[in-house]
Image (cartoon, rainbow, N blue to C red):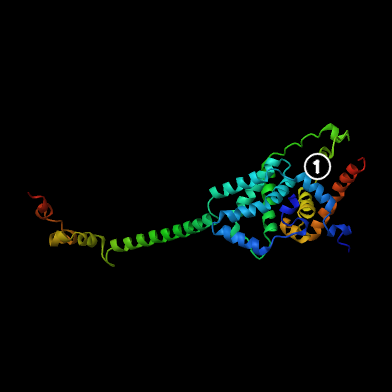
Amino acid sequence: MMEHPMPFDHQPDPELGAALRRALQPSGHKAFVARVVARAAAAPRAGSWDVLAGWAGRGIAAALLLAAGAGFAAGRAMQPAAGASMDEALVMGSADSGAAATAVVRGSRPPDASIVFASLRP
Amino acid sequence: MTPRETQPRAGGARIEHRDEAELVARSLSGDRSAFGALVDRYAEQARRVARAVLRDPDDADDAAQDAFLSALVKLEQYDPRRPFGPWLMRIVANAATDRRRRRSVRSAEPLDPGVVGGGPRPDVVAERRALSERLRQALAELPERRRLAVVLFDVEGYSHAEIAALLKVPEGTVRSEVFHARRKLRTLLEDWKEPS
């Protein structure tokens, strides 16, 4: 199969090339170069945005991980010891309430009013 | 100095890859004068290629400028073992095509009736100007890929293989596009030469 329709396809056509060059030739070369260079100077340095974007992505991922870790740690710190009931946790949370409070919460009978309102006495 | 002497690749002349690679490396390290040197070398070529896609010279210049700025941002992606020209011209062609797609199609400027009718030609300069206008119009009537192929091959001196890589088409397609473009433009050129 003949791939090239005409032998002159292998080489540029100098006459047509020159005519097309004249037809497409722009003017104001120096002004154009100055314009592009000025715009380039005002633009961010090559690649810097890509680097920043990469950092931003990694930063967001790291922040999410840190936040999740901090949340988990805080949750663990606030969590009562395994097996303790809610009542016990409340009692353990207030260390100064002492044996009276423990007795109130754990007792099977209704509490004595003198004990419950003991802290309200002037 | 003629435009041919100032332009890369014209007449088979190629910029030394080492030189280009050095300019690119300096541009990457923030040396704006190195980038300016690259712009200076390729500006006319880029503007001609953009003009092959966009008829309006201002649009073409805007597209060429966008391409240079885009090239600056993508400079780290350039492989210094390869010539800079085809890499840049690919960006130029894409920028021009994008701009043409974004813009509404501008109507072609009407030709001077004297030019169309083959009226009196006062001097060679006016004659050449008229021929240039006819060529630009004939070029505009060609499909975009055909326009780019013939300009990159016959004006800028790129090889079929380079143009194929640049336009992302098989080499045979580039040969065919150049052939068909030449057939049309050659006819115009011969018709123009005959009466004179």
Tell me: B39 left or right of A46. Answer: right
Tell me: B107 left or right of B115. Answer: left
Residue B170 visible in the current orientation = no
Vertical side of A115 occupied by B120: above or below: above
Vertical side of A79 occupied by B156: above or below: above
Question: Mark 1 highlights which residue?
Answer: B132
Q: What residue occupies the far left of the structure in this picture?
A: A122
Q: What residue occupies the far right of the structure in this picture?
A: B194
Q: Nearer the viewer, residue A121 or B121?
A: B121
Q: Amino acid at mark 1?
A: Ser
- Mark 1, secondary structure of its residue: helix
Residue A96 appears in which quarter of the rendering? bottom left
Residue B162 appears in which quarter of the rendering? bottom right
Q: Which residue is painted at 60% across and 54% down in the image?
A: B35
Q: Which residue is painted at 65% across and 60% down in the image?
A: B20
Counting labels gives 1
* Residue A118: % across, % down: 10, 53
